[in-house]
Amino acid sequence: LGDTGAGKSTLIKILTGVYPPTRGEIFFEGAPVTIDSPHAAREIGIETVYQDLALVPLMSIARNFWLGQEITRSFGPIRLLDHRAMAERAREALLDIGIRIRSADEPVGLMSGGERQSIAIGRAVYFGKKLLILDEPTSALSVKQTREVLNYTRRAKERGLSVIFITHNIAHVHEVADRFTIIRGGRKVGDFYKHEVSEMEVAQMVMTGAVPARLQIATPEE
């Protein structure tokens, strides 16, 4: 959690190999790791939905779902995309987390913002093995679409995925979060379990960077 410009997206891009860190270490499952590219992040089980969604508007839902990991068929030395298999498996994978689509062959560019968000999240849930990172997934969505994104987040948790949900909107994430990490100006303000802190206290820390006196003892060192 953090206000606009707090460094949330930059931090996530460091954790997923988009930007190299200038110092410090990254630990994953208790061991230090080097994540120097998004591919390296995927290899250890991290999938990310960035704010721009990383979808190609002119391509179909199925092509976007399998982008970079396409299913192919071999005809001697020639390999061709298996469009039928990609469409069917994409439809089934999305339905598995509650996302219904009209057709897997529909171009993503014809879909609403909420529908595009659901495709990006569905793809990340399907390929994510251990950790799903959502960067401001509700920032431009309606109330109904926000509710759907939160439901997808719950389903990801139910499948055993850990989820990092980056947002400046506390109300959106409060009901699905287990723990809050608040950052401001590129520095961590505090790290609290939900039962330790009220929604109003979180909002104050996001806005001012000041930790309430009753919580200062519980705040871990940076």
Image: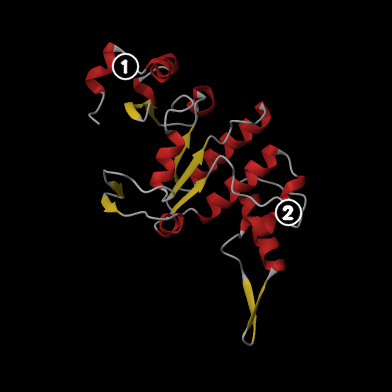
Lower position in the chain sequence, tag 2 or tag 1? 2
In front of the other: 127 or 111: 111
Residue sticking out furthest to the bottom: 76
Taking the image as shown, residue 208 lies to the left or right of residue 122, namely left
- Residue position marked by numbered label 1 in the rendering: 211
Element at label 2: loop
Q: Residues within 10 Å of mark 1 (few under 14, many from 20)?
A: some
In this view, 47 is above or below 135: below
Quadrant (top left, top right, bottom left, bottom right) of the C terminus: top left
SS type, badge 1: loop
Q: Which mark is residue 58?
A: 2
| Amino acid of disc 2 | Leu
The x and y percentages for residue 62 are: 68, 58
Residue 68, position as x, y percentages in the image: 57, 62
Across and down, in percent, residue 39 comes to 45, 59
**What residue appears at the point 69 percent right and 54 percent down from the top-left corner?**
61
Report the Cα–Cα distance between label 2 and label 1: 47 Å
Task: Say above or below: 190 vs 10.
Answer: above
Q: Amino acid at mark 1?
A: Val
Q: Which is more foreground, mark 2 or mark 1?
A: 2
In the image shown, does 192 or 79 lie closer to the viewer? 79
